[in-house]
Amino acid sequence: MYPRIKTSPETVQKYAEDLSIYPPIEINQRNELIDGWHRWTAHKKLNMPEIEVTVTETKNDAEIILLAIARNAKHGLCLSQGDKQKEARRIYHITPVKERDSKKKELAELLSVREKIFNSWSPTLGGFRQNWRKLYNPHPQHWKKHLYSPGKRQ
C-alpha cells in the first residue's frame, strides 16, 4: 500500500542516527503501513527488536492511501513526481467510476500538484489496468510480527 517507489538510503541513515526523535510509525488494524517506511527501515538496519507504532482504524484501501499521502505531505521525505503519479493512478482506479471526475481536483490538492499537471496524467490513469495491490504492496502482510511487540504503545 505504501506510496513510495524507492527507499532513500540517505534518509534511512539519517533516521538511524537518532531514532528517538522521530514519531512512531503508523499502521492500520490489518498491520498495513500508513506512515513511516524510512523509520521502519532504519529500525531494521539497526536490528532493533521493537518499534513504536500508532494504530489507525481504516475502512478501505483508498483511505489507507489517502492517509499515507497526507502524512507524507506533512513531514519526512516528500514523494517524487513518479510516486505522486503512481498514487494518482492507484486512487483513481479504486474510486467508483461515477466519482472519478470529482475526485481529480481533490487528488491534485492532496498530491500538491497543479491541476494542469494532474490532468496531463489523466490519459494514463484510464489505461492503468494491472493489479495494483500486487504491484504496489511489496511489504509483508504480517507487520505485527516484524514491527512491534505486545505491550508497546499502540
Image (cartoon, grey):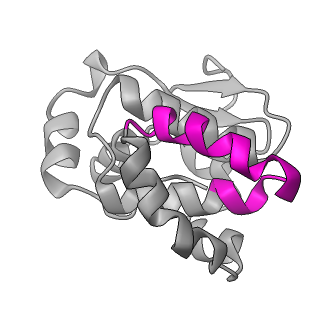
Image point 53% across, 74% down: which residue?
Answer: 124
Name the image quarter holding residue 40. Answer: top left
Q: Which residue: 41% across, 34% down?
A: 72
- Residue ranking furthest to the front: 116
Q: Nearer the viewer, residue 112 or 7?
A: 112
Q: Residue at x 19, y 26 (%)?
A: 18
Give the dominant element type of the magenta stretch: helix, strand or loop: helix
Image x and y of residue 122, in percent: 54, 64
Res. 50 in view: no
Quarter that holds the C terminus: top right
As drawn, is 137 to the left or to the right of 16? right
- Where residue 102 sits in the image (x, y, percent)? 71, 41
Position of 144 relative to 94 (above/below): above
Quarter of the image for the N terminus: give it. Answer: bottom right
Report the span colored magenta.
91-112
Q: Looking at the picture, does residue 4 appear above or below residue 129?
A: above
Q: Position of residue 28 (x, y in %)?
A: 71, 36
Q: Position of residue 120 (x, y in %)?
A: 42, 62
Q: Is residue 72 left or right of residue 63?
A: left
Residue 96 drawn in magenta = yes
